[in-house]
């Protein structure tokens, strides 16, 4: 059974989600895929309210500029589907993100909130972080939200849950 943890950061637009950063981690092999995504369209298309929201997220939350990115938007989703093609379960934190990933992948997706997973900021620094690290954010002085860091935290929390006697199949 293949299981993956996915975390993403982005912007809301037209009752949907525009991904800026996406991380996929294989629960058991520790294989990590991490993408900083180019915007799908020019920022000028956004409404004034959306532009204010984007500005706030850029400055205070994930700190990724709308224009930043290394991977084309549509290619990231094609790559995501290839990465998780053998997935039995995908774990995502938060209802909105869970529904988005379920829609994009068509895979069985579990919201970690339903398993009482704490917020990422409440979880310890993961062991895997010491060997992988983020290429996009300088975490020595970074106070934003990084999808790679969060996905690693959720992975360790979930593995601890399973080792604590919870049956993966029953979840």
Image (cartoon, rainbow, N blue to C red):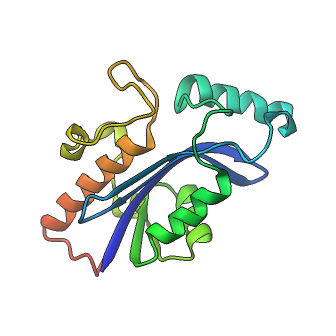
Is 86 or 103 nearer to us in this picture? 86
> Quarter of the image holding residue 117?
bottom left
Say which quadrant the C terminus sits in: bottom left
Q: Nearer the viewer, residue 116 or 13?
A: 13
Position of residue 94 measured from the top left corner of the image (x, y, whole percent): 49, 55
154 relative position to 74: left or right: left
Give the residue at x 23% y 53%: 156
User: Is 155 situated left or right of 148 in this image?
Assistant: left
Image coordinates of residue 48 in percent, x first then y, are 85, 30
Left or right: 11 as drawn, with respect to 105: right
Reply above or below: 139 against 121: above
Which residue is nearer to you in this view: 24 or 150? 24
Toward the left, the furthest residue is: 164
Q: Position of residue 32 (x, y in %)?
A: 35, 54
Residue placed most toward the observer, 78 or 127: 78
Left or right: 54 in relation to 102: right
Residue 114 point in image, percent of width and height: 40, 64
- Residue at point 70%, 32% (across, down): 53
The quarter holding residue 146 reads top left
Q: Which residue is found at the position 61% from the left and 67% from the top?
A: 104
């Amino acid at each position: 059974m293949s299981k993956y943890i996915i975390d993403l950061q982005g912007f809301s637009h037209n009752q949907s989600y525009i991904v800026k950063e996406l991380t996929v981690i294989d629960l058991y092999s520790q294989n990590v895929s991490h993408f900083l995504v180019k915007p799908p369209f020019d920022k000028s298309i956004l409404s004034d309210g959306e532009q204010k929201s984007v500005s706030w997220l850029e400055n205070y939350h994930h700190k990724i500029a709308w224009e930043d990115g290394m991977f084309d938007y549509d290619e990231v989703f094609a790559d995501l589907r290839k990465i998780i093609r053998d997935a039995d379960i995908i774990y995502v934190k938060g209802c909105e993100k869970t529904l988005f990933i379920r829609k994009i992948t068509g895979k069985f997706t579990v919201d970690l909130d339903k398993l009482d997973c704490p917020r990422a900021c409440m979880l310890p620094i993961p062991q895997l972080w010491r060997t992988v690290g983020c290429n996009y954010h300088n975490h020595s002085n970074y106070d934003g939200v990084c999808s790679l860091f969060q996905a690693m935290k959720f992975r360790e929390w979930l593995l601890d849950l399973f080792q604590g006697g919870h049956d993966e199949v029953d979840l």
